[in-house]
Image (cartoon, coloured by chain):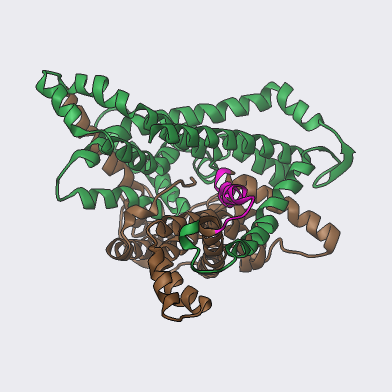
Chain colours: A brown, B green
Amino acid sequence: MMWTLLNRAIIVFVFVFLLLPLVFVVVTSFGDAAMTFPPRSFSLEWYGAIPQPFITGLKVSLIVGGSTAFIAAVVGTGAALAITRGRFRGLKILAMFCLLPLMVPSLVIAVALFQFTGILWDIARIEIGGTLIGLILGHTAIAIPYVVRAVIAGHAHFDPTLEEAALNLGASKWRTLLSITLPVLIPGIVSGAVFAFLVSFDDVPIALFMGGDEATTTMPVKIFTSIEYSMKPDVMAVSALVIYVSLALMILLEKTLGLERFFGTGRA
Amino acid sequence: MGRFAALRVRWGLLALPVIAVLLLAFGMPIASMTANSLFNHAGPGRVGSNLTLVNYINFATDPYYLGILVDTFALGFVVVSICTVLGYPVAYFLARTHSRWRGVLMFLVIAPLLVSAVIRNLGWIPLLGTNGFVNWALQALGLTDRPIALVNNFLGVVIGTTHALLPFMILMLTTVIQRINPQIEEAAVNLGATPWKNFTQVVLPLSMPGLIGGYLIVFTITISSYTTPAMLGGHRVTVMSTFVAQQIRFVLNYAFGATCAVVLMAVAIALTVMATRQSERGS
């Protein structure tokens, strides 16, 4: 009896615990500047007073996230096909290499990229630090494993007779590849790309070390650095907006692809 | 695979772009960093040209640096333990229930994962601050008469990291428990086992292999995390990741920063390999 009660209490506690910080971003975004509990007044003023750098940050995040998702999806799908269908030496090493960025802490990748940009500049006078290209490259590295994994998982149920039928009916191999192979793989590619976007949109370390001025500062980095000194509810307002959009997207994903496929290992 | 032999494409060539991108964005950077760790420090932001192991020797012989490694492991251990205790009942419920609310509850477990970590951490700050909700509630309930420091310290980092990783623990444990045949439990209960006995002598031993795999994964993500310790530790909590960032961003000792990063990477990779072996054994 006690055991059952304790279990129930833990279950209730866990759900409250999981949702509490999200709820509080929203609550505080309507509150007063002191951010104490209970709030003395409620207003919408912070939503009207979101500082420009946060808006710019949001734009940078969307550009970097979108580009990362696109590049990782294209490159990662190729890798997944090579891994599942190729017959060559080094296949196992390739598969391991594609998943390796997942094992390395993203802060370590960030530091490595930062030091590499220094060396690249010294040797070749190429500057990728503080550029969008540098940011996108770094995020692509940590996003590729997710795409490769999603496409390989989607490929597991591929029926080879579909391709044989197309070829027997006279389609060229490129035609078959484009109108049979690729469309069958689309759900896996899309969930990989969505995950790639999320990984990019979530990342702080790489964006912190690869970013420079305002034009290359992503929204998470802007929030991260702004609270190092002080905190105002305007940060909460922009974060609350992101939560509303994420929630809408989540419901959309749940209805289309199913959310349960979107977990694996993550970063905190 | 021979199954796809009909389509005559040299599939291996499709791997060339990924190799190029990963070499440029991952392989060569990691190699550069590892190389930097093997040279001397030559002033702020400069790596010298003398090949040496002095950085590694410094790290391995100084109690302060080793202490940071110990603190990092302590954080991982505490977070994993809390995640296990809190996550197990939820996972068991999700694995066994036929409730029509299961989908909704599963959604609520996964939803926080899809919101940026920075934003989740941000929510904890007004919650845990001296004038925040938790202290208000504790005082209203008469549990304390003075606000407790819940954030900008080790406790704050534990709370934030537990929040970030609890969903992973729940999802992994749910999969593990689902694999246990419910008839075994029914047999135990029919033979007179109390819920506690059923748990300790049937479910727990059977879920052990998967549990250890999940434990290692959550531990590894915890010791790898940077954003949460930096945001909720308030510069007062030094773990490996925050220490590395500090060496690079503020101390400007690139060689030693690289060394500590290599140590952190080696630990994380070793643990991940162990976790993979463990979960292969479990399934």
Q: Is residue A49 visible?
A: yes
Residue numbers of the magenta segment:
A86-103
Above or below residue B209? Residue A178 is: below
Check the image and name the residue furthest to the right: B50
Residue A187 appears left or right of A112 = left
Q: Residue furthest front?
A: A168
Q: Residue shown at 60%/39% (left/top)?
A: B241
Task: Please identify the dominant SS of the magenta region.
Answer: helix
Residue B182 is situated, as x and y percent measured from the top left of the image, at: 19, 33
Q: Is residue B119 magenta?
A: no
Query: The C terminus of chain B appears in which quarter of the rendering?
Result: top left
Q: Is residue A46 visible?
A: no
- From this view, report whether residue B58 is shown above or below residue B233: above
> In the image, A233: left or right of A91?
left
- The x and y percentages for residue B177 are 28, 35
Residue depicted at 61% across the width and 35% down the height: B240
Q: Nearer the viewer, residue A152 or B164?
A: A152
Closest to the observer, B143 or B247: B247
Splitting the image into 4 quarters, where does residue A16 fall? top left
Is A97 part of what is drawn in magenta? yes
What residue do we see at 73% from left, 21% from top?
B61
